[in-house]
Image (tube, grey):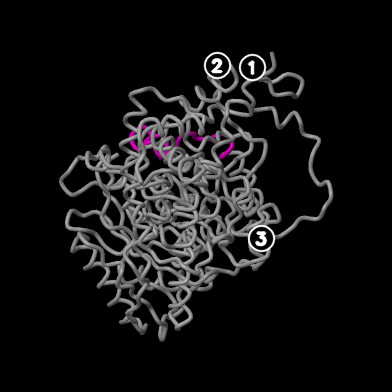
């Protein structure tokens, strides 16, 4: 029998319905693969084999009677940021030690309602703060990709590094992820996988551990564009429990796959050609332009003048919201408690021991920019710049641009414990330079693999769409995928 | 703008994070690097620009004013490090 873990969600779905194998068999294949690989890759922080087998059996019963859901029997990995009832949910942080919520996030509840099977919880940067998955309390995740002829371990990107690594290494059929500044799209680009951050308000944030509430959005990481469409359709919903959930019905995203891009107007923003960008990234971008032109799209040069201010504005807005959201971790209601000489000391000792370095850094920045006397200079200024960033996009969309094509990241995956990144937090932040504008404007963005660099490492392109026009992103990304082909790592683990 | 050691200590206290001398020293450098990076926002002309307060232009949804949830004190304290009869336990606050 062929290796079941190599099938895409769409392929497995067809074969499960045709009864070529059972969900129990597919689930066992994934559990064995995780067992063999996780010691090396560290993609999962918690595997739930009993729950997985139980869910697979229930799916097999439904499949046998012919009334399975859209994801019936498909084994998925869940980022540790999603609340899963009775199961490890710690945002990969020490401060949530032992936390097992008594509720289920809306996104995961939607997946289970459609028949998906949970394999376990995936590693991530602590509280989703990071671009390399090195800030996790559970240690770094390894990228299944290595440069040709090298044994150096590379990062899978972050914060959804466990999700990206697990999908690329065939340790789940697809994974949930979240994106606050690029945390779905950057790891997807680093691992040759597809990742979409939908429009703000498309997926409910209810039951997802909050980082920066006006930026956080859930989305899938998958092996191809069709799988991303299948998963997003299930994850997205209109949810009364999230006041920012938007009342627009969820379309059948899969129907967009295979539609032509003929006559579509694709914007190429000149501001994304940044200083010091490797030639390979520029070449990849040009290839993407050529593919879309060949497919009949019209290429239009555009300008998004406030692009360079998105990242600095993000590093005010996101830490400010985080400092407020993370105030709840006080050693009283859940997780870690470190005793102190009085209650205030208990808070301070608990938070000192429970939060890692990057999380503390961001809470400190957030607290500072919101503190008396600095609010206007920093926070208010950043929120005004954010309005200008959104207006940049509104203007080009109003001028008839359907989607915007950019590189997904300024480089390929870098080494674990990279000295330059460790020495300068700002250098790490620059990883999100092409993705963060999309969060600031609340728009949908998809990263799709488009080629390999000279060392044989995957590189991705990004498409940015109008609000709630994820269908155009799937349609266009599929054209790129058809032209570029798919990319898989050579198995070494 | 940049921060000095005393400011870092004050902010750490506001954020309820205990810091050692060595950590405060290190954070001063790191925070100044980040503040230096965000400084460039000052050059943007924002006169007449409204701050962004809602990501999606929509009216705030309101739930019906009715009790739809509750009676789950046990579930709420289930993850507490210390609890007693559905109360959270904390060190003595009042002398």
Dominant SS of magenta comes to helix
Task: Say the numbered circle drawn on residue A292.
Answer: none
Point out residue A232 in the picture as x, y percentages from the top left corner.
54, 60
Instruction: Give the foreground label among 3 and 2.
Output: 2
Q: Nearer the viewer, residue A64 or A267?
A: A267
The correct choice, above or below, for B2 with respect to A348 in the image is: below
The local secondary structure at tag 3 comes to loop
Q: What residue is disc 2 on?
A: A339
Residue shown at the point (52%, 51%) measured from the top left: A21
The local secondary structure at tag 1 comes to loop
The chain letter under disc 3 is A
Q: Earlier in the sequence, mark 3 or mark 2?
A: 3
Q: What residue is disc 1 on?
A: B91
Q: Is residue A418 left or right of residue B91?
A: left
The local secondary structure at tag 2 comes to loop
* Number of numbered labels in the structure image: 3
Q: What residue is disc 3 on?
A: A238
Magenta region: A32-52
Point out residue A157 in the picture as x, y percentages from the top left corner.
35, 47
Query: Dot 3: within a 10 Å radius of its alpha carbon, few (fewer than 14), some, or many (20 or more) residues?
Result: some
């Amino acid at each position: 029998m062929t290796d079941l873990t190599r099938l895409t969600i769409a392929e497995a779905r067809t074969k499960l319905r045709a009864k070529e194998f059972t969900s129990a068999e597919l689930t066992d294949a994934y559990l064995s693969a995780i067992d063999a690989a996780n010691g090396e890759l560290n993609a999962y922080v918690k595997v739930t084999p009993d729950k997985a087998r139980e869910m697979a059996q229930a799916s097999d019963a439904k499949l046998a009677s012919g009334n399975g859901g859209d994801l019936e029997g498909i084994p998925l990995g869940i980022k540790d940021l999603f609340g899963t009832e009775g199961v490890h949910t710690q945002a990969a942080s020490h401060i949530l030690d032992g936390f097992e919520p008594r509720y289920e996030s809306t996104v995961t509840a939607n997946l289970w309602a459609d028949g998906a099977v949970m394999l376990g919880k995936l590693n991530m940067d602590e509280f989703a703060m990071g671009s390399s998955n090195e800030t996790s309390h559970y240690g770094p995740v390894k990228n299944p990709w290595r440069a040709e002829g090298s044994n150096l371990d590379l990062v899978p990107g972050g914060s959804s590094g466990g999700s990206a690594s697990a999908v690329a290494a065939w340790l789940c059929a697809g994974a949930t992820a979240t994106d606050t500044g690029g945390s779905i799209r950057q790891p997807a680009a680093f691992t040759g996988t597809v990742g979409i951050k939908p429009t703000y308000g498309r997926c409910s944030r209810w039951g997802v551990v909050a980082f920066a509430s006006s930026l956080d959005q859930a989305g899938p990481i998958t092996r191809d564009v069709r799988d991303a469409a299948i998963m997003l359709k299930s994850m997205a919903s209109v949810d009364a429990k999230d006041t920012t959930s938007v009342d627009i019905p969820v379309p059948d995203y899969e129907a967009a796959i295979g539609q032509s891009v003929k006559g579509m107007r694709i914007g190429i923003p000149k501001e994304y050609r940044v200083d010091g960008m490797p030639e390979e990234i520029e070449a990849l971008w040009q290839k993407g332009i050529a593919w879309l032109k060949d497919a009949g799209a019209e290429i239009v040069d555009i300008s998004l003048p406030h692009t360079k201010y998105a990242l600095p504005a993000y590093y005010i807005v996101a830490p400010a919201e985080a400092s407020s959201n993370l105030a709840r971790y006080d050693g009283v209601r859940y997780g870690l408690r470190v005793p102190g000489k009085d209650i205030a000391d208990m808070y301070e000792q608990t938070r000192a021991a429970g939060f890692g370095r990057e999380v503390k850094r961001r809470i400190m920045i957030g607290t500072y920019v919101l503190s008396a006397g600095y609010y206007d200079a920093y926070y208010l200024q950043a929120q005004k710049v954010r309005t200008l960033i959104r207006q940049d996009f509104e203007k080009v969309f109003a001028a008839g641009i359907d989607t915007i094509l950019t590189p997904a990241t300024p480089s390929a995956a870098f080494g674990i414990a990279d000295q330059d990144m460790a020495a300068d937090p700002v250098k790490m932040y620059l990883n999100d330079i092409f993705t963060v504008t999309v969060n600031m404007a609340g728009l949908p963005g998809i990263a799709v693999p488009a080629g390999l660099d000279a060392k044989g490492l995957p590189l991705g392109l990004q498409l940015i769409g109008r609000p709630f026009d994820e269908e155009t992103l799937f349609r266009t990304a599929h054209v790129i995928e058809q032209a570029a082909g798919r990319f898989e790592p050579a198995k070494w683990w | 703008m940049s921060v000095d050691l005393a400011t870092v200590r004050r902010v750490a206290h506001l954020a309820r994070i205990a810091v050692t001398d060595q950590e405060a020293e290190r954070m001063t450098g790191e925070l100044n690097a980040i503040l230096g990076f965000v400084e460039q926002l000052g050059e943007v002309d924002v006169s007449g620009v409204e701050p962004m307060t809602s990501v999606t232009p929509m009216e705030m949804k309101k739930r019906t004013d009715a009790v739809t949830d509750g009676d789950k004190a046990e579930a709420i304290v289930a993850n507490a490090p210390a609890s007693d009869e559905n109360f959270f336990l904390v060190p003595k606050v009042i002398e």
